[in-house]
Amino acid sequence: MKRIFTILPYVWLLALFFIPFVIVLKISLSDAALSIPPYTPTLDISAGLDGLRSFWNALDFESYVFLTQDDLYWKAYLSSLQIAAISTLLTLLVGYPIAYAMSRAPRNWRGGLMLLIILPFWTSFLIRVYAWMGILANEGLLNQSLLWLGVIDTPLALINTPVAVYIGIVYTYLPFMVLPVYAALERMDDTLIEAAEDLGCSRLQAFWSVTAPLSRPGVLAGCFLVFIPAVGEFVIPSLLGGSDTLMIGKVLWEEFFTNRDWPVASAVAIVLLLLLVIPIALFQRQLNREAGS
């Protein structure tokens, strides 16, 4: 029974990660064609060894070479990484105080506060993004409220700007930051704070010396849960950022469904995956070394 539970995660990864990765990699090494599907496979598995030889002879990484020749792609990668990093930082700055307040609230309140955090998931993601379009529009709720309060004289141009993208990402992924940080803080032993204060630490010093280090695993988990999907985000920049917001998710969509260049689109996806997986794997390996030392 124990062996079955050990094998199940590997079966899950094989079915939902490795096999799709191999399929996309195969398409990225194919040639574009005006057909259905719009590519000509260079690897014919049914041909056996002859198919492998012909595939090896035709292997030219043409799609990957094309990515290096057009600066649109590396600009999209850099822009996506920048937007995702800033959004993750903003989400942490907003989410950590919320998680800290939840962990310090009376125990009979915590269930209700947790419900408020996950309540947005009961509504369609697309509907929530459309709602932000109405809120941030020139005649939207936010501008009308600021005009009514006398804070501004003319409506702010928020929609179709990077600011709107940051607002949308922070709002959408905030629960993914709050929940792991709250889990780490909620498990913390409060007597450690009392001991630090008894030893002469102020409340702020006790926080930085005890609470912050103990909540680090939750912070790292939350940052990963926000950063990884934010890099490949497509809906939020398309609806809130407009045409001027350059992100690799939008480029990937256009290559697949507008240009119908599946090999290039697959190459874009493979490079994006490597940009995310390799650093995260190295970082996790370093954490394991530090934990073992």
Image (tube, grey):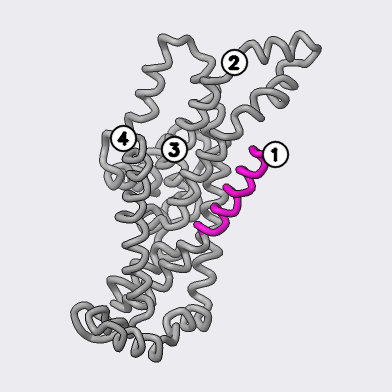
User: What label sits on residue 189 in the rendered view?
Assistant: 2
The answer to which of marks 2 and 1 sits earlier in the sequence is 2
Residue 246 position within the rendered picture, expressed as x and y whole percent measured from the top left: 47, 65
* Left or right side of 232 for 221: right
Residue 261 falls in image quadrant: bottom left
**Magenta part mainly helix, strand or loop?**
helix
- CA gap, disc 1 to disc 4? 32 Å
User: Label 1 belongs to which residue?
Assistant: 293
Check disc 1 and report its element: helix, strand or loop: loop
Identify the image quadrant of the C terminus: top right
Query: Looking at numbered disc 4 in the image, what kind of residue is underneath it?
Result: Met
Q: Are marks 3 and 2 in contact (CB under 8 Å)?
A: no
Foreground mark, 3 or 1, reads 1
Magenta stretch: give its range. 276-293
User: Residue drawn at (38%, 52%), measured in percent from left and top?
Assistant: 236
How packed mark 2 is, by other alpha carbons closer than 10 Å (few <14, some 14-19, many 20 or more), is few
In 3D space, how far apart are the residues under numbered discs 4 and 3 (Cα atoms)?
Answer: 32 Å
Q: Amino acid at mark 1?
A: Ser
The answer to whether 15 is drawn above or below residue 41 in the figure is: above
Q: Give whichever of discs 3 and 1 has the lower sequence position.
A: 3
The amino acid beneath tag 2 is Asp
Front one among 127 and 92: 92
The quarter of the rendered structure image containing the N terminus is top left
Give me the C-alpha separation between circle 3 and circle 2: 23 Å
Is residue 50 rendered to the left or right of residue 280? left
Q: Secondary structure at mark 2?
A: loop
Q: Which residue is the site of mark 3?
A: 176
Residue sitting nearer the eye, 291 or 126: 291
Q: Position of residue 258 (x, y in %)?
A: 29, 74
Q: Kindly report which numbered mark, 3 or 2, lies closer to the viewer in this rendering.
A: 2
